Image: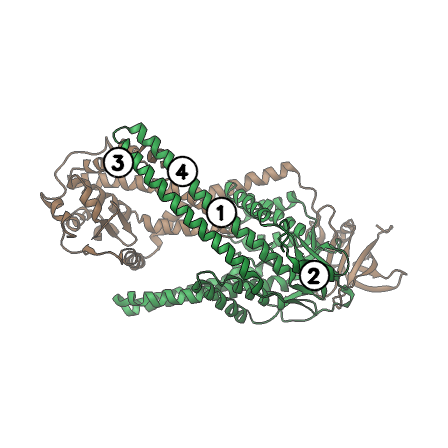
Amino acid sequence: MTDPTTGLGAEEDATRQRAPGPREPLFVWRGDLLELYKIFLVNVALTVMTLGLYYFWGKTRIRRYVWANMAPGRYPDDRLEYRGKGSEIFLAWLIAMVVLALAAASIYGGASLVGEWAFLLLFPFLLGLFFLAPLVYHTAKFAARRYVLSRTRWRGIRFAQTGSVWRMGLHTALRKWAQYLSMHVARPFYEEAKRRCTINDTWFGDRRMAYTGDAGPLMGPWLKTLGAMVAVAVGGIFLGTVVALVGGSALSGSEGDGAATAGVGIVVMAFQWVVTGGMLVGFAYFWFAYRAHSLAHAARHTRLEGCEFAFRCGGGELFRFELVNWVALVVSFGLAYPWVKVRRVQFTADHLETRGDFDPAHVAQSAPEAPRVGEGFAEAFGLDYPILGVVEI
Amino acid sequence: MAGGGVYRAYLTDGRSAERREVEIRVAGRDLVVEGPHGSQVGRRPVADLEPLEAVYPGQPLRLADRHHDDFHLTVPDASVLDELAAVSSRFRRVRKGSVSTASLVRWGVGAVGAVTALILALPHAAALATPLVPYSFEERFGGTVVEALVSSRTVCAEPGTDHPLQELARRLGQDLDGPGAGVKVRIVEGGPANAFAAPGGEVVFFEELIREAESSREVAGVLAHEMGHVVERHSMQHILRNTALSMVVSSVIGDVSAPAARAVDALATLSYSRSAEEEADDLAVEYLAARGYDSRGLVEFFERLAQDRSELEEGMNLLSTHPAPSARVERLRHRVSEGSPPLPEGALERMRTVCE
């Protein structure tokens, strides 16, 4: 049975009984919006003045401020540290650009060699892209996550992500291809593969996180969501067709009368917008209901030593949260970025909880090989991976 | 503050996540770290220490040692910075004051102004940079683009072959240097009733435009307009400008695929595309007049477009990349002139059947 307000099921209740100690926020936010805004605006000005070069250092400044103002809920005075440097991600960007340029030159050179028969290569090229794109995308994001974790510390102890990012990328991309080929039915397998890869290979010092979830419990809710979204699409297309037919007939009736034609045109267009908007809201409603359920599932199956986690948020709340973020960014042409960033951190702090034993005194530093430069295309191009594995910060 | 320049602090040594309460004080050029009963835990040159981040009001000072990665000190009372700054200049600008609304507004105006200035300057920069791109590269790139765009359609008239529009392009190009001299015209089946100039000097006409044209001088006007785009290398300028804009916007906002980035890009594209269209209109009239041809066809084409548009479409033109046809008619009406027919008699009829 699922709690309609939290999206949590009976499994969660069992977890709640098992976990000792009080429930606490996983982390708290201690920052100030105005301070972050000033950093952001200075970054914008310097980035423009240096024709984009300062971006890498600006990104690091923002990250350093955000990290320095996040602390575990249980230890609110001990903030996180970020030790990354702008030069590291600048170097990563340079490497990414060289690789991209070489790839583009190879494709162009190959096409030039075969001359007018180049079109024959189009299909194999697109097929290759279909298979390679998810692999490169996920590998790049795992590499970005590994870099950021390697530069994150708490009480001097490093976080880390171990394992080969290419293995993780392949593991996740295989599920992504399966998702495409199954017309999205197999999506939960993709989500869970990604979580297993990231969470199981995440370390805090010598302590390893663990993920015990699997796709089975998510399949039912996902199939219901998929069914509902298909129903919304079919309903929307049907309504849109009806509006078009009725509108078309009204337009031919008003032929010769310019004002009447314009009036009917406006009404038809307004109806089409309402139908399209309704479809989008319908998709979003069902998607976020599932998303909240899936995030709760992910948190519930994550462990760090004796600590358990919970994500408490309903689909409606998540939908409203993301909608406001999206609208704010669009209408402000991106100037609401710091506000959205703080809002996202605060939202995560408010909804992600932990309980259970964890003694920092027993955590020792581990010494995994930390990457020397920022890694991967994703890091270089600003596509961050959700560091907490649950909600993107 | 513990008093007398002694500060409470927390030390972590990197061996475990346990923190140890200590007292610190600046002695000469060193920072002395002492245990609770005065036992010395360590002594480090201040010059070796560095702050982990800027310190805002209410935030602790956190120190790391540049030579010992695991040393980490958290000092809740950041006023120790004054003593550290007296020893090492590295600590002088670490402390940040409260952010006032006025300073935020100043930086906001500066940032928005810088972004706006850059967006306004980009088209000029792109125009300056375009001649630096080898035209041979643009031709090869344009060929690939056109092949991809028309690959699913039947080509009714191959570029460079003998057809009236190719012949007109050759005549109009006789007085032009550079890209305008070698324009190739291709006609492909189907719609929309439009034409476009690809990078590299190829103009593609869709059959529907020729079918709907009411006179051959309308088609000639459109060709001359597209040749204006070719001569000015607007496609390459557009590519350079968009690439630069995407880089700037993504570096400000963080992700070029973000909706905000797309919104900025779309708005900037609107004004730039419109000025390019107006420039191509002016050049079209100039090219036709230079050869003594009738240039009224361009205005007639836009008049017909304006008539076919509903009031709603006219009102929605704010969101279009092209100026409104009615506005283009107003701009060009007094510039066009009578002259000899640009295309021979019967050419339009022949072109209408070229796809049959």
Tag shown at residue A15: 2
The chain letter corresponding to green is A
State how far apart marks 1 and 3 are (Cα): 36 Å
Q: Secondary structure at mark 3?
A: helix
Circle 1 sits in a helix, a strand or a loop, which is it?
helix
Q: Amino acid at mark 1?
A: Gly
In the rendered structure, find residue A282 and report the number of the disc placed on it.
1
Residue beneath label 3, please? B308
Give the CA separation, mark 2 to mark 4. 48 Å
Q: Amino acid at mark 4?
A: Phe
Q: How far apart are the two marked residues, 2 and 1, measured between alpha carbons?
A: 32 Å
Circle 4: element type:
helix
State the residue position of label 4.
A271
Q: Viewed as shown, does residue B170 lie left or right of A351? A: left
What is the x, y in percent for residue A183? Answer: 44, 61
Q: Secondary structure at mark 2?
A: helix
Contact (Cβ within 8 Å) of mark 1 with mark 4:
no
